[in-house]
Image (cartoon, rainbow, N blue to C red):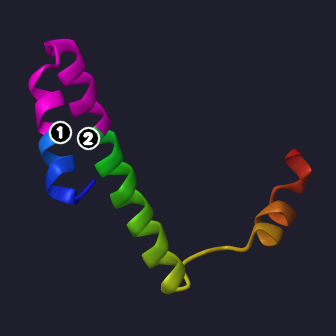
Amino acid sequence: MEIEARKYHLIERVMQLSEHELSNIEMFLEREAKLSASLDRALQQVKEGKVTPHSEVKKKYEKWL
């Protein structure tokens, strides 16, 4: 199925959703956007070297484990 047809099919399905179903999709999209932004920040921190290796963290807190 070409992309335009898939989009049209999706629009048709969205138009038939109940208020509850639409709210659920909106909440899902908001959570996904927040997660994506969080992952982007984390990846940037890795690129900038602002991370601590697991072995160092484990050694630091081994007395509490």
Q: Quadrant of residue 28?
A: top left
Q: Quadrant of residue 51?
A: bottom right
Say the numbered circle drawn on residue 9: 1
Is residue 19 positioned above or below 29 on the image? Answer: above
Residue placed furthest toward the bottom? 48
Pointer 1 local density, CA inside 10 Å: few below 14, some 14–19, many at least 20: few
- Is residue 7 located in the magenta-colored stretch of the structure? no
Say the numbered circle drawn on residue 53: none
Viewer-proximal residue among 42 and 36: 36
Separation of marks 1 and 2 at Cα, in angstroms: 22 Å
Disc nearer the start of the sequence (1/2)? 1
Say the numbered circle drawn on residue 30: 2
Please give the range of residues in magenta. Answer: 11-28
Q: Quadrant of the C terminus?
A: top right
Viewer-proximal residue among 38 and 65: 38
Residue 31 drawn at (x, y percent): 33, 40
Mark 1 lies on a secondary structure that is helix
In the rendered structure, the answer to whether residue 42 lies left or right of residue 23 reads right
Q: Which residue is depicted at the point 37% across and 57% down?
A: 36
Most frequent secondary structure within the magenta stretch? helix
In the rendered structure, the answer to whether residue 15 lies left or right of residue 34 reads left
Pointer 2 local density, CA inside 10 Å: few below 14, some 14–19, many at least 20: few
Residue 14 drawn at (x, y percent): 15, 29
